[in-house]
Image (cartoon, rainbow, N blue to C red):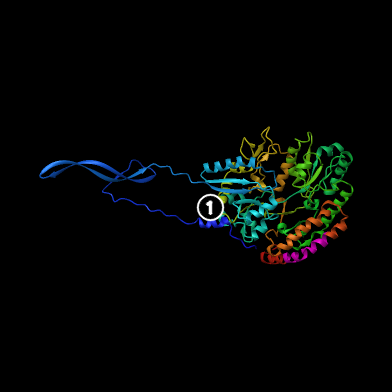
Amino acid sequence: MKTKRMTRRDVLRWTGLGVAGSLVAACQPKVVEKIVEKPVEKVVTQIVREVVKETVIVEGKEKVVTKVVEKVVEKVVTTTPAPKAPVQIMFVESWFGVPQFQASLDPVTDAISKKMQDEGLNIKMRSVVLDDHETKYPILYAAGEDFAMAFDAPWYRMTSLIDQGYLLPLERMIEEHGPSITKIVTQEVLDANITRGHNYGIPAYFYYGQTSGPVIRADLREKYGAPEPLGQWDSLEPFLVAIKENEPDMIPLVPGESVAKYTHQWPTVTWSPGDALPGCSIPNLWEEAKYADVESEEWWVESCELLRRWWEMELIPKTPPLDMDIINELFIPGKCAAYADNEPDYKYADRQVAIEKFVPGAKVMGYDVSGQRAGKIKIGGRLRQWNFVVYNAQQPFDKRTAAVQFFNWLMSSQDNMDMWLFGVDGVNYKKEPNMRYSEIEGLDQTRNYRRQWYVSGCPGKYQRLDIALPKPAEEAVIFLSTFENFRFNPLEGFLPETKPHETELATLLATQDEVGYPLDYGELPTDEAIAAWTKGMDAAGRQKVKAAFQEQLDAWIEQNKPFD
């Protein structure tokens, strides 16, 4: 762990904790008269001088003289104290989901702040969009920047930030300030997401698992008579061939990251705890809880071989567009006919709305090729989540408290969650009955405010569905959020201690990008690419870290007895 240096902000904060005192002087009154005009808010003291006449005896004769008498008068008067400044908290936005723009965020956060303050919670919240999230996000913590909350995930920076002490343990704060958080998220889900003995974030949950497969141009499939891809990934091939033969200016499929990332071939189930160890996973969770090199798993090799065949057939790009946004720069404008995604059988509906603006008459459909919807496999469902809102442990106590109170307020009503997710009713969207919404005609949706549930901290079942959502997509949502459709992972409570292996893990991540590239895009013969992969990953320390993680997992199993 790096030694935390005290920043200039730290110094200013500590030196500002001195308490100033004040002395109040008062005159000894000659006459005290209490005048209570009416019940009000504040007592003030005034010295009042009055001229009075008095008869006195001077040399045996009466004489009228005047004198000045001072009175100290206490008055209870009506006063309106100056309003207390709201506690200001900052939220660091996610970098994925829907694009966020400061110009669309600010009016909504203003509206949220006003609603909070009108309802008695004196907090002003703001959001910030980082232009280089990958680089700048971890620097915010190291530099002691003034932000209270952020989106994060165990597969992103969350685990390392926990190890560095930057993230705030939340269980006591939620207990004291977050009854609505507990009610909405549920204690069961909170308990399932304890890491290193603490809740380090508010889990955004909805799906108990994920489907996977292609999102395709359905109008072109129908036009050229290709069958629907209703099997595994290779069932997509006739469609890709039809595109290559009939649409020479269109890329048939852009796999993005390897298609293997999105597939659970029947009937194998694999899992990598916290996605912490590149190049390894735990196959067949209920049979043997042992880390394995991914290249030893049949489904992974088959996926690599499929990509190589498609590369040779020119069904995927010979030179992958690595720096492009596949969905928004290629698929939506009509430059490719298919791409790989998770939850394709639900997300295709969003792509349909977007593509209509660019390609009139285009139709989109998404298919689960993992075998789950077909009843071929139950993947490992999970209560432990992969997306969180985390809290900055370096914030002052009042801001930490306000940040938890903000989320408690957020989850205290559907109206509040609607505003957080969709913006202002009538401005950014229109509420519809039965937890549906509709878009406002003429509004530029590419710049409109919108926040997906999985980066919001709110459970997905509280996000309204599009009133125009097709029936197949609605059925996918129901499937993904139904407990009985999944076989729950007995090892999900295990998270390896990564800090002793930070150097090796960083090296493995960099090596994975380098030696994994030919596998992800089929650029080399599979045997040759896998040999280079194995050599590179092992040289980067994979076997050493795998052995250490296995030892931790064995100890965790012995202590927790997950298979009993």
Q: Does residue 432 appear in this view?
A: no
253 on left or right of 64: right
Residue 544's image quarter?
bottom right
283 versus 472 height, above or below: below
Inspect the magenta stretch and tell me whether residue 534 lies in it: yes
Would residue 561 be counted in the magenta stretch?
no
Front-most of 328 and 12? 12
Q: Position of residue 206 (x, y in %)?
A: 67, 48
Per the image, the residue denoted by label 1 is: 398
Which secondary structure type mostly characterizes the magenta part of the structure?
Answer: helix
Q: Residue at x 36, y 46 (%)?
A: 43
Callout 1 crowding tier (Cα within 10 Å): few <14, some 14–19, many ≥20:
few
Query: Looking at the picture, which amino acid does disc 1 mark?
Result: Asp
Magenta span: 533-550
Give the side of residue 173 with respect to residue 285, left or right. Answer: left
Q: Position of residue 318 (x, y in %)?
A: 86, 48
- Residue placed at 68% from the left, 32% from the top? 442
Q: Is residue 309 visible?
A: yes
Residue 461 picture location, percent across and down: 65, 45
Q: Nearer the viewer, residue 215 or 121?
A: 121
Query: In the rendered view of the protein, which quadrant contains the C terminus?
Result: bottom right
Residue 211 % position (x, y): 75, 49
* Depth check, front residue: 530 or 137: 137
